[in-house]
């Protein structure tokens, strides 16, 4: 393994440099690495680096799995393959004291730590919601919060040094996640001044595409918690749109076919209709917490909600919507409730009214839903609508007997199970898609 494709390595012989010998002592049997050989061009910097990294790695009190997860998040986002391969196996062998005790993929502490590392690395200024979530999971231990911030900051320094000087000649190597994140604004053909907003997360040119459609009153935050637990996610396209919008975005991004369209609430109806109208564009459909037609009485309910928004603003609507979405028994945490409230409050009244009107009178049966042969999974949060949403989707499965349809409920979750029961939702989704 070369030291660097930019500068030659410097490896003082044992006994000839106290600084190099101190680094060898910390490294153990592995000896000096290409990173050390690069740093030793400036011995005092190499000495300070060795002291700092030694403290971060071995003298702190963060659980080992949490520390390594944060380091790996930094390495992945900064494309630092050298950093990744030297920490991936450490992460696997790390202390497991904070791992979940049930079948969840990641614990609440691990998820909050990953979110913190992600924001600190990508936008630098970490949001109050994210910071408070991590602090809460650390039992309000301020020392551990400072240590977590120092871990992320330190390994951002490491990855930037590795990449800028092409240490070990690995700056062109691909790391698992994510390879590329882009925002897209696709103009509407009949109204060029308006556009569809989309985000794409590309991991590999050979990975399948998934499409995620969120509900009314939400944005792409709906899927952000799920996104964090993909260890090797497929390419992802996340956006809020109606049926033809999905097809339009796929065409604009030159995507001939996707592995699945996943939607929740209004987005779930979009996913079902997309499978009916564009069966050649997707292999699978996942529709969550939705209905094949406007339920009886819903027109009046939507009209009432529009009136609340106009009278009390979107904050007033959030006050009555979030408890309905996440009733008693939902494990929704305070930071996630705040994130949900923020999504609702950031929705314009006009936009909400337009979306609500679209939900007042629709019937996918009239559009030929029962004839659709696209493989479909119906998912419902167990608590959504007091169990009525799950009951309705079970009934849809029975009625849709000629299709390739399955149903699963997500226990102890509400209207948006990808938010209040992320790990359980992922287990259901993964079991269907993989």
Image (spheres, rainbow, N blue to C red):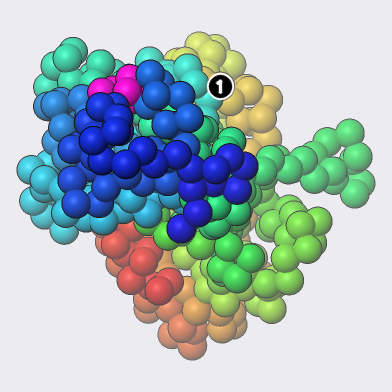
Query: Which residue appears at 80% of the width and 45% of the height?
Result: 186
Instruction: Look at the image and tell me whether residue 4 can be seen.
Output: yes
Residue in the foreground of this view, choosing between 305 and 351: 351
Residue in the foreground of this view, choosing between 341 and 95: 95
Q: Main secondary structure of the magenta part?
A: helix
Residue 49: within the magenta?
yes
**Is residue 136 placed above or below 39 in the rendered structure?**
above
Relative placement, left or right, of 327 versus 221 is left
Residue in the foreground of this view, choosing between 162 and 348: 162
From the image, tell me which residue sits under label 1: 346
- What is the magenta range? 47-52
Q: Position of residue 118 (x, y in %)?
A: 43, 34
Which SS class for mark 1?
loop
Query: Which residue appears at 53% of the width and 73% of the height?
Result: 284
Mark 1 neighbour class, 10 Å CA radius: few under 14, some 14 to 19, many 20 or more: some
Residue in the foreground of this view, choosing between 401 and 189: 189
In the image, farthest residue toward the bottom = 402
């Amino acid at each position: 393994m070369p030291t660097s494709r930019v500068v030659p390595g410097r490896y003082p012989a044992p006994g000839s440099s106290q600084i190099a010998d101190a680094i060898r002592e910390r490294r153990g049997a592995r000896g000096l690495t290409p990173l050390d050989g690069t740093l030793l061009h400036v011995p005092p910097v190499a000495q300070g680096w060795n002291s700092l990294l030694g403290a971060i790695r071995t003298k702190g009190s963060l659980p080992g799995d949490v520390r390594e997860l944060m380091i790996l998040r930094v390495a992945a986002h900064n494309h630092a393959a050298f950093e990744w391969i030297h920490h991936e196996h450490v992460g696997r062998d790390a202390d497991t004291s904070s791992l979940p005790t049930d079948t969840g993929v990641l614990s609440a502490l691990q998820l909050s730590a990953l979110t913190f590392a992600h924001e600190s690395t990508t936008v630098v200024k970490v949001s109050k919601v994210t910071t408070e979530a991590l602090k809460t999971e650390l039992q309000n231990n301020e020392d551990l919060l400072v240590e977590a911030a120092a871990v992320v900051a330190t390994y951002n320094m490491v990855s930037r040094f590795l990449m800028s000087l092409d240490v070990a000649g690995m700056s062109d190597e691909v790391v698992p996640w994510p390879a590329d994140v882009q925002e897209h604004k696709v103009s509407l053909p009949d109204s060029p001044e308006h556009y569809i907003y989309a985000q794409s997360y590309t991991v590999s040119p050979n990975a399948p595409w998934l499409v995620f459609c969120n509900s009314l009153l939400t944005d792409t935050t709906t899927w952000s918690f799920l996104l964090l637990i993909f260890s090797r996610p497929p390419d992802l396209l996340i956006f809020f749109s109606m049926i033809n919008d999905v097809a339009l975005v796929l065409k604009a991004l030159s995507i001939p076919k996707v592995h699945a369209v996943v939607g929740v609430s209004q987005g779930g109806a979009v996913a079902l209709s997309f499978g009916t109208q564009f069966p050649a564009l997707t292999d699978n459909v996942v529709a969550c917490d939705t209905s094949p037609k406007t339920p009886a009485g819903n027109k009046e309910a939507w009209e009432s909600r529009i009136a609340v928004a106009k009278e009390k603003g979107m904050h007033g609507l959030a006050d009555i919507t979030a408890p309905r979405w996440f009733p008693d028994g939902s494990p929704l945490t305070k930071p996630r409730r705040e994130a949900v409230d923020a999504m609702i409050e950031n929705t314009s009244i006009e936009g909400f009214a337009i979306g609500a009107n679209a939900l007042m009178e629709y019937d996918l049966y009239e559009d030929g839903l029962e004839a659709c042969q696209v493989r479909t999974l119906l998912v419902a949060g167990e608590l959504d609508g007091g169990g009525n949403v799950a009951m309705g989707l079970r009934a849809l499965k029975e009625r849709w007997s000629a299709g390739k349809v399955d149903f699963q409920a997500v226990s102890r979750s509400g209207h948006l199970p990808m938010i209040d029961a992320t790990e359980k939702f992922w287990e259901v989704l993964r079991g269907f898609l993989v």
